Image (cartoon, grey):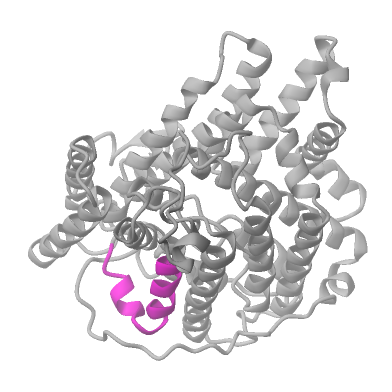
Amino acid sequence: MSAPATTPTASSFDRWFELTARGSTYGREVRGGLVTFFTMAYIVVLNPLIIGTAKDVNGLFVGGTDDVVKAITMVSAATALIAGLMSILMGAIGRFPIAVAAGLGLNGFVAFTLAPQMTWADAMGLVVLEGLLILLLVMTGFRSAVFTAVPEQLKYAIGVGIGLFITIIGLVDAGITRPGVPLISFGVFGELQGWPIFTFTFGLLLTAVLVAKRVKGAILIGILATTILSIVVEAIAKVGPKVGPDGSVANPTGWGLNVPRMPDQVIASPDLGLLGQFNLFGSFAAIGVVATILAIFSLMLSDFFDTMGTAFGLATEAELLDEEGQIPHFESILVVDSISAAAGGAASVSSNTSYIESAAGIGEGARTGIASLVTGGLFLVAMFFSPLVTIVPYEAAAPALVIVGFLMMTQIRHIDFTDYEIGIPSFLTIALMPFTYSITIGIGAGFVSWLVIKIFTGKARDVSWLMWVVSLAFLFYFAIYPFEVLFGVK
């Protein structure tokens, strides 16, 4: 669908963000930015629980402190600051409705794999290095060239896989599906128990009806209405949190992450003491050159493809691809994403990356970078009003992710599953993203299987050299354990 042309009377602000050209309005962009913020604001609470509670090789928390409360407080403030600044930069430069924040999975790798082997400053310096190297690949055109080389139907499979991925994120956040035996169990001991699950179910059905009726602001209305219901339920039923102070599941029918109640304190002064606490080359002395290179490779591969997959999935959902199937301002998006990775390391909050939860804002109508300006501004406000951010529980935000997952799933119509050469790699891409909780692994499985099938069907000559390079890099990534053993890393 071609976008309407920009009118001659449009303001320079409108023309820069292509607001009219993309058929959007300021109201839709603001709603989209609000929805995206509410669906990813959890990172201000969750990232500190990962980065702020892990100890480095010296037994210290991030920032060189032995006070876990101080570490968590500093990580929370810095997480909101970098997410705000980078989301605003993405909106202003990338001009695309993608918000940016500390990457889940990447923060776990930094906290539980890198930090125990070196100081926190060394670990964060390694993250900065990775971001700078990714930026170099973007500036040379390599990163976008790889994206262009990927078969079109495999790109759609990435979008579908992301849709299922964020759906399962929503279902897990809400407690509808949980780890267990079998692999994923239903509710609590096979039953939908507890007020939080009732709240999620209410929110899901409400949002589904509003979306089906094409109500403007459907997703935002769903989040706000479900949050209000959550506050009322907690005030009456005194449900309490799911996780106890020691991190164990003390109350299986409790609220996930946030307990929806009005906080005692509304405004809190942010502690930005973590900014600049990184050692760029300290990891080389701490774990050696080979181990550092392997660590950088692992971080780079995840950052490299997560954003590519996310951007394509979101652009497809927003119907923003051009006639050649390319993402508008793609190079700018990649540049900001690379800067965000380095900025996250420089602020000791781990690599920042583009968030797939931005799909919720797109589902609400966001089509331009203005939505990211709104989301970024809210993150900056969240530095001071962090107690209010914790009002929205998982169960109130998760319905938006499930509904948007459905919207992204509709892209599957573009994949010809009767052609097994592309159908099998597409299936593996779609299946492995949600089941491994990793966009990168899903993309890697699709690429490697596609290359193998091409080789053994006698069509290896049809594979571009870039797809050879990338697929073999993924093959190395999947088989990295024996290399780590060989070089004494493990």
Compared to 73, does 183 lie above or below?
above
In the visual, does 160 lie left or right of 353? Answer: left
Q: How many marks?
A: 0
Image x and y of residue 54, in percent: 59, 71
The image quarter containing residue 383 is bottom left
Q: Is residue 181 visible?
A: no
In the visual, does 79 lie left or right of 449? Answer: left
Q: Is residue 91 visible?
A: yes
Asked if the magenta segment contains residue 233, the reply would be no
Farthest front residue?
Answer: 8
Pick the residue in front: 259 or 460: 460
Image x and y of residue 178, in percent: 38, 42
Q: Residue at x 53, y 79 (%)?
A: 78
In the visual, does 140 lie left or right of 91? Answer: right
Residue bounds of the magenta highlight: 373-392
Q: Residue at x 47, y 21 (%)?
A: 413
Pick the residue in front: 334 or 427: 334
Q: Residue at x 73, y 46 (%)?
A: 144
Main secondary structure of the magenta stretch: helix
Asked if the magenta segment contains residue 376, the reply would be yes
Image x and y of residue 273, in percent: 57, 90
Pick the residue in front: 155 or 331: 331
Q: Residue at x 19, y 75 (%)?
A: 262
The image quarter containing residue 25 is bottom left
Image x and y of residue 422, in percent: 65, 18
